Image: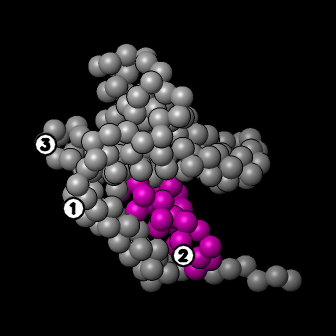
Amino acid sequence: MTAVPRRSRGLTPLLVPLLAGGLVVLALGVYGRAHTPTGFAVGVAGFSAALPMKAWLTTGVLVLAFVQLVSALSMWGRLGITIPPAVHRWSGRLAFLLTIPVAFHCLYALGLQYDVPRVLAHSLLGCFFYGLFTAKLLALPRRDAPGWTLPVLGGLAFTALVGIWLTSSFWFFTAIGLKV
């Protein structure tokens, strides 16, 4: 007979993941403000400019985030259908990889801006997303974490991504158009 891991009711098992996530948020925000933005795009790889690259890659991330949501609901038995856990893992990995060039460009070329409310919200949501992602990955192997940990952190990460998309890609597509 195998022992079922005991779930903790306290927050102690989440102390390190949440502190690490908070440090990531803080580090990205401080770097974004302290770093002198270069103002030019790096690595637009097949796109006409940085903004279309960021808008389309972020849209891809949003689509993959919906795959994450549906596959997570399936894994938690909330859909009545079974989606292999590998779909969740690989869609998450791909989504994260797509965020890297976007985040790099945002931090390197633009920094954390606060002059325009939409841009401030976008900058803060970007920092918040990476902090949540860090906390979620560090909490994932913790068998003593409360049962609500992964759904809450995943839900917050999904919400942050929707906010990031609304303050960037949606704005771009409605203000500029569907440029590639």
Residue 23 falls in image quadrant: bottom left
Q: CA distance from mark 1 to mark 2?
A: 35 Å
| Residue corresponding to mark 1 | 34
Q: Residue furthest left?
A: 115
Mark seen at residue 166: none
Residue 139 falls in image quadrant: bottom right
Q: Secondary structure at mark 3?
A: loop
Residue extent of the magenta highlight: 128-154
Q: CA distance from mark 2 to mark 3?
A: 39 Å
Q: Secondary structure at mark 1?
A: helix
Q: Position of residue 97 (x, y in %)?
A: 57, 49
| Residue 134 included in the magenta stretch of the image | yes
| Residue corresponding to mark 2 | 145
- The residue that appears at 86% across and 83% down in the rendered structure is 1
Q: Earlier in the sequence, mark 1 or mark 3?
A: 1
Task: Name above or below for residue 106 compared with residue 178.
Answer: below
Three-letter amino acid code at the position of disc 1 = Ala
